[in-house]
Image (cartoon, helix red, strand yellow):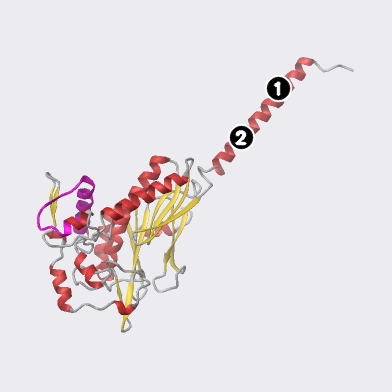
Amino acid sequence: MQQPDPKEIMILNRIVVYSVIVIFLVVMAIYLLFFSGKTGQYNDYEDYIFGTYIKIKIASKVNTNTVAKAIFNEMKRLEQKYDPYNESSVLYKLNNSEDWVEVDDETLSIIDTSLKLARYTEGAFDPSIGRLIKLWGFDKFTQNQSTNQFKVPTATEIAEAASQSGYQKIAIDYLNKKIKTNGVWIDLGGLLKGYALKRAYQIAKEFDKNCHGFIEAGGQIMILGPKYNKANWVIGIRDPRGQPGENIAIVYMKEGSIATSGDYERFFIIDNVRYHHIIDPKTGYPANKAVSATIISEDPVIADAFSTAAFVLGKDNWLFTRTVFTKYGAEVMIVTPKKEQLRSDRFYIYEVADR
């Protein structure tokens, strides 16, 4: 019987060893791809900022505790900086000065953006209606407040507050970085969460450009990346007249932002009439042409501001909304008081799961 060649045995042993090493490396690569913190291990965080709960779901190769803390700290900075009732805030100084106020680059950019969005929407979004919001009691509103703490302002009070509103009155001196309100009260509630989400996205990507998940702020979501780096996030659009958790539509997204404004978020009821926080700048009363408006956009600032504007414009101005909003990269869906649903041409794309 022929004896095995020692050299052949050595070669076979090496092949076996190399094969085991290759298999091990492949298994480790698969593990890192699908099960490491970079792609599969989502961590959840929550904090209360901007009068709502901010929720972060994130997977990253870096410490997600550090990322979440940085995001929350940035949002708290913005909340304090642009709180119109904080005497040290930029908005307090602007709203309580009759003269030009020097501002930093960030504030100049935010106010400039707010005025552009006001022009794009022909005033349906208006950052100058702080007096009206305060008059209606929605400046410090919490849903736990009793209805008897609210009252419907008189027509005279509304007319007076409206006369001290109007985004056209806000002046910007770009050369000297100064702003003058000319008697109006600036309120950035219609876009500040969108801006905060934009900053949150930037911060997350600075830590790890491949991180993914999403950040939710009230009625708005900013997606950090596809679910498990490849799948859609399934997002429900709340039925404005249903119970919490009941949806009127479902969308599928891997990127971008979605914002919904509804009359069910902050409201009070007197004599069976619902009064909510989305004020129509042209009338001074809560807008009544829609009960819900949803915007999908790559830019969370546009999504935030346009959802307010679309709600105000409602069905009566649908042609304008559908035409102009899509021009600025936004897809829109509104629900009318009769629960009729109107969608822009490409909104339907997001309702297809496998696209």
Quadrant location, the N terminus: top right
Label located before the other in sequence (1 or 2): 1
Classify residue 30 as left or right of residue 208.
right
Classify residue 151 as left or right of residue 19.
left
The disc at residue 228 is none
The disc at residue 26 is 2
| Residue type indicated by callout 2 | Val
Q: Which residues are magenta?
A: 94-119
In the displayed structure, 105 sits above or below 120; it is above
Classify residue 135 as left or right of residue 304.
left
Q: CA distance from mark 1 to mark 2?
A: 18 Å
In the displayed structure, 342 sits above or below 225; it is below
The disc at residue 14 is 1
In the displayed structure, 303 sits above or below 135; it is above
Q: Position of residue 300 (x, y in %)?
A: 33, 53
Classify residue 18 as left or right of residue 339.
right
